[in-house]
Image: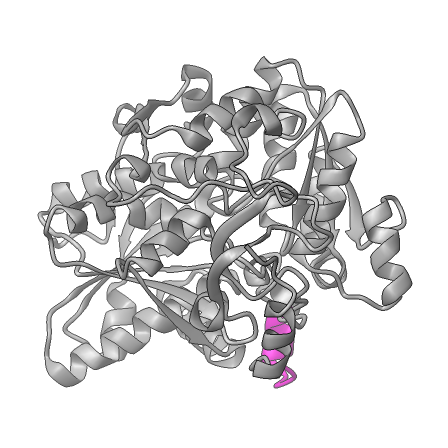
Amino acid sequence: MDAKRVLLTEKDLPTAWYNLQADLPEPVPPPLNPATKQPVGPADLEPVFARELLVQEVSRERWLEIPAEVREVYKLWRPTPLVRARRLEAALRTPARIYFKDESHSPPGSHKPNTAVPQAYYNMKQGIKRLTTETGAGQWGSSLAFACSLFGIQCKVYMVKVSYQQKPYRRSMMQLWGAEVTPSPSTETNAGRRILEQDPDCPGSLGIAISEAVEDAVTHDDTRYTLGSVLNHVMLHQTVIGLETEKQFELIGDFPDVVFGCVGGGSNFAGLAFPFLRHKLAGKDIRFVACEPHSCPTMSRGKYLYDFGDTTKLTPLIKMFTLGHSFVPPGIHAGGLRYHGMAPMVSLCAHLKLIEAAAFHQTECFEAAQLFARTEGIIPAPETSHAIRAVINEALRCRDTREEKCLLFNFSGHGLCDLGAYDRFLNRQLEDYAYPQEKIEEALAELPQL
């Protein structure tokens, strides 16, 4: 427990992903066909996703083997360090022990390649030549571009327009890895043109970008769609984070009391939390806190209902916490958290009271990120700063109560491509925004009736 950084070797890399679906007290509700309201099977989605990913989507096997080719690519940056944030602890004068799993070590600088690599691999094995996707802040788009470059696949990214303008260097990363990047909504798809007719100045949203990417995929025979969060197989791939972290805690004889992660679609939170959730399901006392923005409070103020995963209703209906598929959040700088829905597996865990949600304003999150940078030296992504804010709040409570809790969070990515946002913060140009309840109710009123 005296260690600052807990390191594993390549031989410690997990050989299988952990599937929480095997241990949940009830199954994840299936996606539904919006016309018939009947469950959608893997065969129905083959024009959209690679076959092996659809098998993983519905699997209830506890462990699924990681292909050797994927593990070899993982070794470019994995295993990642578990770091004790001792200087942050000292600055807060807290008796709490604060650890973070540092996922900023990947080539694109975030946790996203953990699923981008297997998704590109399985599509390559099926003979798919081209992949489409959406991206918010650009962490997912750059990760898929990176993965496609390794497996010889063309990559097309629809990037939420406000992020395309705010984060030009993420766009440059994608293009360096060979991807074609288009601001969304665009004039390249029927979905994009329809949105622009209604609102020529639309800043875009992940729901709109998903609509464009799905439409692109299903209208090209050599193309499939990929999603960087939300879906069950994405949660599965990300569990390498928590599985490594378990081993690292074993090495130092410690174990987390509270696990934190930021949530937009839910992938980095699930990647760290799900392996530890099986211990909670077995009776261990652990809290799990999903941290989101007040401006897009999917879990805090959304409803657990069936909804479309995209704005123009191209996807099946998904049971999830949602703000409504027509919800367009404001252009906060944590672009990766600006999604109207939450992963079905994360949503079910919240519905079952296995995890809790906490919402934060962006200014207080940037303040937490600044303190973290000044103590631990790493500049966090704006998304990650939401988890840091929650950890700091808990550590301060521990100072008041003198509790020596072990606090763990996922450092989901660095903020080196987000310095424009930090410039605005340093110049006091950031504004906090709590989404009006009446606007949320308007979007929720458009949910399909089952």
| Residue drawn at the location 56% of the way across and 66% of the way down | 323
Which corner quadrant of the image does residue 437 belong to? bottom right
Is there any visible trace of residue 436 in the rendered image?
no
Q: Viewer-proximal residue, 47 or 240?
A: 47
Horizontally, is 333 left or right of 130 in the view? Answer: left
Q: Is residue 95 magenta?
A: no
Q: Viewer-proximal residue, 281 or 105?
A: 281
**x%, y% of residue 139?**
58, 49
Q: Which residues lie in the magenta part? A: 421-432
| Residue drawn at the location 76% of the way across and 39% of the way down | 215
Horizontally, is 71 left or right of 408 in the view? Answer: right
Instruction: Give the answer, above or below, for where 112 lies relative to 283.
Output: above
Q: Viewer-proximal residue, 67 or 297?
A: 297
| Residue drawn at the location 45% of the way across and 44% of the way down | 105
**x%, y% of residue 359?**
43, 74
Q: Is residue 429 magenta?
A: yes
**x%, y% of residue 68?**
41, 16
Instruction: Give the answer, above or below, for where 253 lies relative to 263.
Output: above
Instruction: Give the answer, above or below, for where 183 lies relative to 115.
Output: below
Colouring style:
one colour
Is there any visible trace of residue 299 in the rendered image?
yes
Number of marks drawn: 0
| Residue drawn at the location 60% of the way across and 14% of the way down | 126
Quarter of the figure with the C terminus: bottom right
